[in-house]
Structures are given as C-alpha cells and as structure tokens.
C-alpha cells in the first residue's frame, strides 16, 4: 500500500497518538516522538531518508517490509502477526527484519510468524511451532519440530496425524 | 494593505513605501497618470462581458502596483479585503505593472462576514514585462460571504513568469476567472487551485490560457474536495495559436466528492492549431481510496482521522507547488482546520 501525500513520520505520529489516546495515555510531543523514532529506527536499521518520504511511495520490497517492522516497533502491538515476512527478502534484509523482531520480543507481547520455510526460524527462534493444514492446526511442538519438517517434508506430518495429503 | 468594502483604508494599512522602486497605492490617486492610462482596461477588455463593463463603469477603488525595472519585493505584499454587511455592490479594480526583470509577490486574502446579499465584482489586470515574475497567492475565506465574481487578466512578455494559487475554503457563490495571454516567447504561466467546499458553497474556476507565440509553457493543476451540498466547477481552456510552435501546456483537474449531494462540473479543453506541441489535459472525479483508509485504520488511526489525512494528502501536490514555505504552511493548517470541520 502506497499513500502519496502522507509522510511516513506524520502517519506514525498520528497512529501512535491515536492509539495512546484510546488507551488513556497522554499524546507524545514532537521532541519525545523524534527521540523514540531515532531509537527504534536503529533496531531495524532504517535510513532517516525513508522516514521523511511519503508512506511506502517508491519503497523497494525490502524497504516496505523494514518499514512494517519499524511501524511495529513504534506502535508496540501486544500481538504481531508476521505473514510470510520472509518472502521476497534477500539474506541481509531477512537478517535485519528478523533482528528487529528479536529486539522487540518481550514477556509482554507475542508474535505469530507465518512461514513456509525453516530459514526464517534460524533468525527468529520460535517458542512453539504449529503446523497448519487446510485451515486447522494439525500438530504442535517445540522449535525442533520445524527442523524435522524441513528434513522430512509436510506429507510426513499429514500422514502421521491422519490429515489429508494433497 | 487593507480594503474594507472595496475602499482603501490607509489608517489600517502599513507604510506602503517599504520597497524601493515599487509603488503600491490606492488606484484612485493614479488614474490620470500615464502608465496607468496606457494599460488600464487593455488587459481585461470589456468585450461582451457584462461584469467587466459594470466594473469599468464604476470601480470602487483598487490597488495599483508598479514595479520598476529589476526591482523585487523583499517580502510579499499582503492585501486584505474585508467585506461586511449586505446589499452592497463592491467593485475592486487592480492594476499590476511589472517592468523588465521585476519580481513581485502578493498575497490577496478575502474575508467576509454577514455579507450574503452583497456582490463583489473584481477585476485585476497584470502586465508582466520581459523576464519579470509575478506571484499571486489568492485566498478566499468568506464565511457568509458575498457573491464573488473575479477576473484576473494577465499578459506576460518574453521570458516572463506568472504564478497564481487560488485557495477557496468558504464563500457563497465564488467565480474565479483567470485569462492569461502568453504574449512573448518563453513566457510561463502556472495556475494552481485548491478548494474545499461544503454547505451550499459554489466555486467556479474558469481559466483561459492563450499560447499566442512560440516556446511558451503553461501548467495548470486544480484539486478539490466537495462535501455536503457544495458545487464545484472547473472549466479550463488552453488555446494554442498556429504560430505558437513548441508549446508545452499541461492541465489537470481532480476532485473528490463526499456524499450524495456534492456536485462537480469539470471541462478541461485544448484547442490547438500549431503542429509541434506537447499538450495534455485531464480530469478525475472520485472518492477517497478505501484501501488507503483500511491501511491507516489497521495501524490504529481512527476513521475520521484517516479520512482527514487522505483528504489532505490528495491536495498535497498542489500545495507543494507553492514555493513560499510560510504561505504553504499557513494554507495547510487552514485546510486541516476546514477538513476537521467537515
């Protein structure tokens, strides 16, 4: 989604303050906001240039994803759903995006990371792995489950749980 | 400079001798002077236009601005027109003359109160000399204002430049006509407009750009949001004469309608008789982008705020053309306040 005419910064500040208002918190002033931006931008290695540009306008695929993670860092959701964040990212971008997620992880929030590949999970090490097939969770396990899947393929888990194979 | 109901008020105005080589005064004092006589009524001839004839018959008062060769306004000249009270006929008559290389920037602001049954019928003639540069920022913010019919007649000499941005936020019946003659080679005209209309405000932007000679350029961008029972009209015409080779002319009008009763009539026109030209024209009428609204709302922005952000964003490219940063910021904040009230 590209929105010309709305700068990244202006958008973030509005979104943040609207959320804070809804939660009964005081709005963040310009100076505090900028301090926070600088601090959080470091987490995802965002260039200052990207902040002042119009929202996602002319961003590359990697920049858009990085911007998403940056928005997450700013807006601090309790639950983050990262749907195939790894698609279309090169190794460096993947490392940066995953690094951002890792730095934001805390006991107060949770992330659902949706992926087809183990590779992302080398960077974001999950607490629990759920295998979803045909809209249902058919198997859950520790992080080792993902490695097992990578080695044996999806059919294995479908057969072992009696799920329908494709 | 302050004009109340069309009359110049020296007691409310600043010292007019701030810029050396630039005369700014009430037109009344200068009607018999040579340069005024030479141009008065020439750039905006009466023809068959009733309102021009009415104004020419009995102008109330007006502004004369004479910039001698190479002079420059150190800061914009701010003209404030206040209209108050009903049942009046007010006919401002301005004449701007810029000699070779002069550079003049003027802010013209119309405000009005309780003037619903009055008529303001204004004519402004601008003669822009060789290499001279005239920038007009026009703001119409007349709550319960008069009917306002205005005409800007402009003629631009070689390598001269004319730029006008017209912002209409409040008014009853507003009609802005801009007639530009690109009369010398490499002259350039830029016409920008923004309007945010609600209530029963009617705003008509009527432009004519005449490419009379070769190698001139013109660029026109009008954008607006119309809500409630507001009505917008855009009728822009670019006329390229047979001799006006290598003309480049761009014209665009884009509108967002909010609600079932808002209306826009738009007609961009090109009439071209030269064969080596690059011209484009177009118009759009639409709604705010639902996907954009969803994106903003999914990040916690409320619907009202998201609409306001996208509405403002819609007009950003017009505002970005305004080179005076202070004025641009001022307009942005006025537009934001207006959008918030919608």
Image: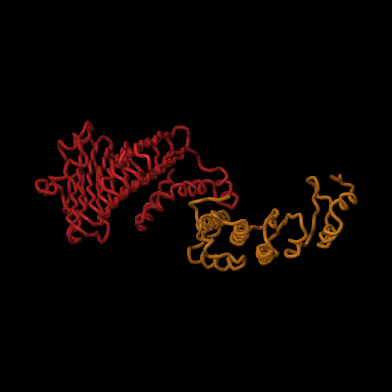
Chain colours: A orange, B red
**Image check: B223 left or right of A74?**
left
Q: Which of B96 and A15 is in front in this view?
A: B96
**Image check: B33 left or right of B187?**
left
Q: Nearer the viewer, residue A52 or B97?
A: B97
At a point 18% along the width and 53% down the height, the residue shown is: B66
Expressed as whole percent of the image width and height from the top left, the position of residue B106 reads 27, 53
Task: Check the image and report above or below for B20 versus B292.
Answer: below
Work out which quarter of the rendered image holds the C terminus of chain B and state it. Answer: top left
At a point 56% along the width and 54% down the height, the residue shown is: A56
The answer to whether residue B275 is visible is yes
Number of numbered discs overlaid on the protein picture:
0
Expressed as whole percent of the image width and height from the top left, the position of residue A86 reads 70, 57
Task: Check the image and report above or below for B225 versus A123.
Answer: above
Expressed as whole percent of the image width and height from the top left, the position of residue A25 reads 55, 59
**Image check: B205 left or right of A166?**
left
Residue most extreme to the left: B32
Task: Check the image and report above or below for B81 versus A62.
Answer: above
Q: Nearer the viewer, residue A80 or A69?
A: A69
The answer to whether residue B112 is visible is no
Expressed as whole percent of the image width and height from the top left, the position of residue A92 reads 67, 65
Task: Check the image and report above or below for B237 versus B135.
Answer: above
């Amino acid at each position: 989604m590209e929105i010309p005419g709305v700068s990244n910064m202006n958008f973030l500040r509005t979104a943040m303050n609207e959320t804070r208002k809804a939660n009964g918190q005081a709005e963040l002033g310009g100076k505090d906001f900028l301090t926070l931006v600088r601090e959080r931008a470091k987490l995802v290695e965002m260039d200052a240039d990207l902040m002042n540009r119009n929202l996602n306008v002319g961003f590359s695929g990697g920049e858009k994803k990085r911007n998403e993670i940056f928005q997450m860092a700013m807006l601090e959701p309790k639950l983050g759903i990262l749907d195939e964040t790894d698609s279309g990212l090169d190794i460096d971008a993947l490392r940066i995006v995953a690094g951002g997620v890792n730095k934001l992880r805390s006991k107060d929030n949770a992330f659902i990371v949706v992926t087809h590949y183990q590779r992302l999970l080398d960077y974001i090490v999950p607490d629990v792995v759920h295998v979803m097939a045909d809209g249902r969770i058919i198997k859950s396990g520790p992080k080792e489950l993902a490695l097992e899947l990578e080695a044996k393929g999806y059919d294995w888990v479908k057969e072992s749980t009696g799920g329908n194979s494709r | 400079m302050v004009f109340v109901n069309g009359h110049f008020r020296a007691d409310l105005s600043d010292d007019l001798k701030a810029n050396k080589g630039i005369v700014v005064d009430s037109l009344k004092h200068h009607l018999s002077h040579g340069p005024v006589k030479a141009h008065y009524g020439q750039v905006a001839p009466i023809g068959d236009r009733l309102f021009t004839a009415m104004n020419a018959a009995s102008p109330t008062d007006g502004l004369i601005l004479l910039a001698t060769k190479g002079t420059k306004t150190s800061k914009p000249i701010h003209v404030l027109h206040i209209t108050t009270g009903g049942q009046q006929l007010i006919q401002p008559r301005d004449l701007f003359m810029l000699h070779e290389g002069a550079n003049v920037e003027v802010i013209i602001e119309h405000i009005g109160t309780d003037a619903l049954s009055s008529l303001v019928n204004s004519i402004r003639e601008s003669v822009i000399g060789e290499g001279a540069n005239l920038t007009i920022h026009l703001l119409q913010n007349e709550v319960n204002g008069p009917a306002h019919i205005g005409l800007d007649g402009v003629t631009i000499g070689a390598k001269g430049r004319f730029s006008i941005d017209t912002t209409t936020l409040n008014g009853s019946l507003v009609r802005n006509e801009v007639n530009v003659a690109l009369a010398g080679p490499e002259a350039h005209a830029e016409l920008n407009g923004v309007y945010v209309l609600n209530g029963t405000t009617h705003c008509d932007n009527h432009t004519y750009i005449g490419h009379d000679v070769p190698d001139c350029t013109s660029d026109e961008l009008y954008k607006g949001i119309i809500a409630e029972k507001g009505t917008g009209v855009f009728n822009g015409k670019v006329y390229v004469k047979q001799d006006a080779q290598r003309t480049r002319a761009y014209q665009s009008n884009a509108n967002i309608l909010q609600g079932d009763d808002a209306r826009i009539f738009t007609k961009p026109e090109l009439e071209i008789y030269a064969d080596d030209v690059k011209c484009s024209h177009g118009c759009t009428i639409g709604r705010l982008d639902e996907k954009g609204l969803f994106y903003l709302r999914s990040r916690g922005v409320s619907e009202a705020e998201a609409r306001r952000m996208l509405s403002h964003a819609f007009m950003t490219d017009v505002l970005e053309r305004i080179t005076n940063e202070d004025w641009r910021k001022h307009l942005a904040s006025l537009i934001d306040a207006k959008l918030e009230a919608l």
